[in-house]
Amino acid sequence: MATQRAGTSSSSSMSNEDSEESSYFDSLEEGRMPLLDDDEYNNGFPPSYSEIMITESETKTRIKNVPYSTRLPMERHKAGVALLLLFIAAVSNDIVLSYIHDIVPQGKPLPDVVFAHTPYIPQALAYSEYFMLTLFAGLLILTALHRHRWILLRRIATIGSLLYFGRCITMFVTQVPVADAEYFCSPRFETPQRTFANIILRALKIVSGVGLKINGKHTLCGDYIYSGHTVVLVTCYLFIKEYSPRNWKILHFICFIFSFLGVFLLLISRGHYTIDVIVSYWISTRVFWQYHTMAGIAALRENRSPHNHLCKVFWFPLFQYMESGCLRPVPTKYALPFSWQKCKKHFSIRLIKFNSN
């Protein structure tokens, strides 16, 4: 009797797991997995990943039946669109900076609590930018080695473009005096010279400098609210931590220290006001976390519930376009961007052709 009951209970549990698994895949296929639905979830909680895992023996047969929505397509064209948006946002920042350079208030820097309690070290700005470039280089390496590198690249460019388009607006609407009284600012245009063509040409001259002082081309003043340096420092750390294994704690700690030091050096060099850094951190983290929350939970991207307020952001249509083919979290798996076997075959063919000639 005990054996029969155990067999009955095990078979019923297996049938329940199969039904949960099939309902989960069906909901993903339709792109409308409900939130806390009693029919889909047990006791109001979603099934864990262990409940939807398939056995190794069933992998080959089950993978053919897995709907397209549960896979992670590369969609290179979307990455190209995102990179184009990021380039437009970067150029727009330089155009806005070239416009406001002539109308920035001339006077003493605004009162700042960090300025009042820290020494002024103008050379610290260069070190801050070195930390920023180190984090960015680490993110590029992580992206190149990630198995889903095109998804990661698309998300980096999309979030970056959103943050820099927002920075265009804040720079344009409010100008504050230069934070560093000793910083060299290029001469302003006189009224007859301040034409649209001259503003565009001046902006294009600093595009190649990508807003860095170490390049020697950033001599326009006024790009304060909010801090572009902090955007890069914070988002690089967030992306590295998000798309690397959780047990890589040493890497996460080093990236956090680099990010923190970069921001601190930015402040003691008077490269930005403290309010610029605070606003930049707030906006960068909220955009990053909201984007990845909706990207990881397919049901949140459907505007069907009046209680889903995440879909009310202005960039939600762009998010739907970018993430329409990716309906589950991206795993932290890595692979070389090229295959050794293909490279070996390619060079072997070239070598045979060379010897034949």
Image (tube, rainbow, N blue to C red):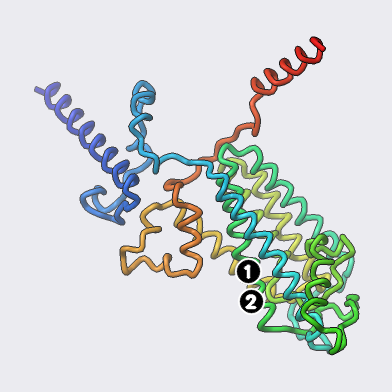
Q: Is residue 298 above or below residue 228?
A: above
Taking 314 as reference, is 355 left or right?
A: right
Q: Residues within 10 Å of mark 1 (few under 14, many from 20)?
A: some
- Where the C terminus falls, by quadrant? top right
Q: Secondary structure at mark 1?
A: helix
- Which image quarter: residue 275? bottom right
Q: Residues within 10 Å of mark 2 (few under 14, many from 20)?
A: some
How far across and down, in percent of the image, does residue 27 sit? 30, 47
- Which image quarter: residue 158? bottom right
How far across and down, in percent of the image, does residue 24 sit? 30, 43
Taking 31 as reference, is 98 left or right?
A: right
Q: Are marks 1 and 2 in contact (CB under 8 Å)?
A: yes
Q: Which residue in the rendered view is the most extreme toward the front? A: 357
How far across and down, in percent of the image, does residue 103 sit? 78, 86
- Which image quarter: residue 113? bottom right
Q: Nearer the viewer, residue 327 or 264?
A: 327
Taking 315 as reference, is 184 left or right?
A: right
Please give the residue where the numbered disc 2 appears in the rendered image.
169
Please give the residue where the numbered disc 1 appears in the rendered image.
165
Residue, x 50% and y 61% (percent of image)? Answer: 318
How far across and down, in percent of the image, does residue 239 sit? 61, 51
Q: Secondary structure at mark 2?
A: helix
Residue, x 34% and y 24% (percent of image)? Answer: 61
Q: Which mark is residue 260?
A: none
Instruction: Inspect this view and state whether residue 25 appears.
Output: yes
Task: Check disc 1 and give the amino acid type.
Answer: Phe
Q: CA distance from mark 1 to mark 2?
A: 7 Å
